[in-house]
Image: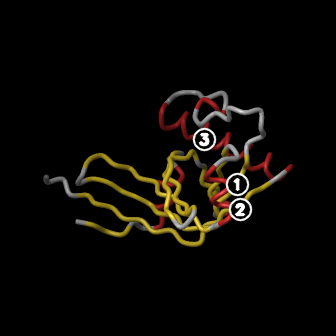
Amino acid sequence: MFKNLEDKEIEYILENNYVGQLGYIFNNSPFVVPITYFFDKENNAIICYSGDGHKMKAMRKNPKVSLLVSNIENVTHWKSVLVHGVFEQHFGSDAKAYLHKFSLGIKDIILEKEQSKASFISDFSSKIYKDDVPAVFIIKIEEITGKKRLDFRV
């Protein structure tokens, strides 16, 4: 049976995960890529960073994006959250503050969920291979929906 997630379930999923699927549009085509994120509940935003490539160019051009986060045990037992929002790139001290919050938040999730200690961003997120400074951005949340299926019969 499919049901809508309650707000507390949605928050739990966003707060206790750090990998999601980012959806964006480029040249009128949809793209979905995995991305490391941190849910900033205080500011109702998703914090991310990236190299300055395809997705950054696409989101600057069309800032409407989505993020899907799922907990899947099997085909009949899963929960998923879909965030709709607006891309907003940050620079300078704002970017550093967001990146710091991102890093500390994910380290806490990894310690709690995986009982391992991450020391550097590269331990849990894609490396930036160039000498470029990563582009820090947030997704300002406009809407969140969630669904679940909890049927233990196959």
- Mark number for residue 146? none
In the image, residue 134 sits, relative to residue 27, either above or below, namely above
Name of the residue lying farthest toward the right: 93
* Tag 3 near tag 1, CB within 8 Å: no
Marks 3 and 1, Cα distance to the nearest angstrom?
16 Å
Q: Residue at x 64, y 44 (%)?
A: 105
Question: Could you say whether the residue bearing mark 3 is in a helix, strand or loop?
Answer: helix
Above/below status of 100 relative to 119: below
Considering the image in quadrants, where does the N terminus appear? bottom left
Residue 103 in the image: x percent, y percent?
A: 67, 40
Label at residue 88: 2
Q: What residue lies at 41% left-to-right and 53% top-to-bottom? A: 70
Q: Nearer the viewer, residue 152 or 82?
A: 82
Compared to residue 73, the image places residue 65 above or below, namely below
Count neighbours of disc 2 (C-alpha within 10 A) and say few if under 14, some if 14 to 19, many if 20 or more.
Answer: some
Circle 2/circle 1 CB separation < 8 Å: yes
Asked whether 152 or 46 is in front, the reply is 46
Q: Amino acid at mark 3?
A: Ile
Q: Residues within 10 Å of mark 1 (few under 14, many from 20)?
A: many
Q: Earlier in the sequence, mark 3 or mark 2?
A: 2
